[in-house]
Image: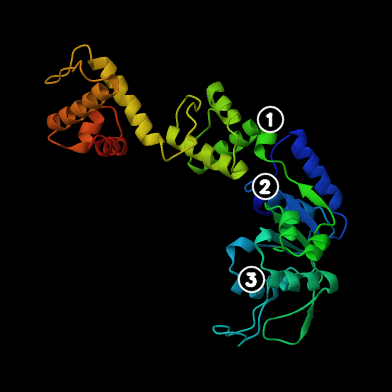
Amino acid sequence: MKNNQRVIGSSQALADALDHASILAEINRPILICGERGSGKELIAERLHYLSPRWDKPFISINCAAISDSLMESELFGHEAGAFTGATKVYQGRFERADGGTLFLDELGTMSLKVQEKLLRLIEYGEFERLGSAKTQRVDVRIVAATNENLPSLSKQGAFRADLLDRLAFDVIQVPPLRERKEDIEELASFFAVKLSTELGWEYFQGFTPKALTSLKNYDWPGNIRELKNVIERSVYRCGFQDEPVEKIVINPFTRANEEASNNLINTQADTIESKPSGFSLNSSLNLKEQVFQLQQHLIQQALNENQHNQRLAAQSLGLTYDQFRGLLKKLK
């Protein structure tokens, strides 16, 4: 695979998709790959190319959602010098660069109807013109397209050409979402963790605790493999190099700091509440939440006073990071 990428997992759902791709690799027809974002559609497209007779020819990809409508036509078909403002020289589009090989059109559902019309002509006749040119270009390109949209539904709405859908969908490969192949999660998680550990120069990776693996398998992964990779790398990095397996899985990086800081302060309160911190007394007229809030305020203020209002030292005295301490300052006003 390109860039040393490989498909990881041994679930039946994944095996079925890979077998389907292997069979279709031999036939020179357009293929449509359907699957949720982050599910690995590009890896399936690469498999179709590298197992095909075109394996030694170019594999060119383009994300249709990342390029504006005004530039998409030029990106795909190229342009002549002077075709539009800023076009100072001849530009070869993706189809010309993929001649003899495979062009992968990712996020196909975002393509405009105008570009769809030119794409249909190229599929039918193998011909196109660069922007600003009347000269017909001929190419031999196999098209593999991918989408997370419901193209038949878009076609009924008039947002996607029905005739283009017919031509692209000689056959359709369905890539399973990660929630349907949970038996692959541990293998994928270990792969991403070891890779990051190597990148960070750590000697080894100790693995995950059973609690961590349960957390991973109980989550639905709406972002699929891409989301899993980010979560694993974040969790391993925050855990740091140590002699014990990773136990805490950080799925949401936006809530962790304040939640953990509150937990640490609650633990501090449990250790000190019996002795009642100096200058602080419980008010029985307040409910538990209000008393805890006041105790947190008192502990923060006391830590600041004892450390000459140095927030970093105050944070250390409470067993918090500086960012956690700052978050609590804002929360507690």
- The tag on residue 72 is 3
Q: Which residue is pictured at 64% across the width and 63% down the height? A: 64
As drawn, the residue found furthest toward the right would be 27
Contact? badges 2 and 3 (CB < 8 Å): no
Please identify, in this view, whether the residue under mark 3 or under mark 1 is nearer the observer.
3
Q: In the image, what residue type sits under mark 1?
A: Glu
Q: Residue at x 53, y 37 (%)?
A: 232
Does the residue at mark 3 contact the one at mark 1 (Cβ under 8 Å)? no
Tell me the amino acid under the disc marked 2. Gly
Amino acid beneath label 3: Met
Residue that badge 2 annotates: 40
Where residue 57 sits: x, y (%)?
A: 77, 64
Q: Residues within 10 Å of mark 3 (few under 14, many from 20)?
A: many
Above or below 269: residue 58: below
Q: Residue 306: image x %, image y %?
A: 13, 29
Q: Position of residue 163 (x, y in %)?
A: 81, 65
Label annotation for residue 76: none
In which quadrant will I find the C terminus? top left
Residue at screen point 20% across, 15% down = 284
Identify the residue shown where x is 80% and y is 40%: 16
Alpha carbon separation for disc pair 3 and 1 = 39 Å
The Cα atoms of the two marked residues, 2 and 3, are separated by 23 Å
Residue 271 lies, with reference to residue 158, above or below; the image says above
Where on the picture, by quarter, is residue 160?
Answer: bottom right
Q: Is residue 54 visible?
A: no
The residue carrying mark 1 is 183
Residue 151 falls in which quadrant of the image? bottom right
Front position among marks 2 and 3: 3
- Residue 198, percent across and down? 53, 40
Secondary-structure class at tag 1: helix
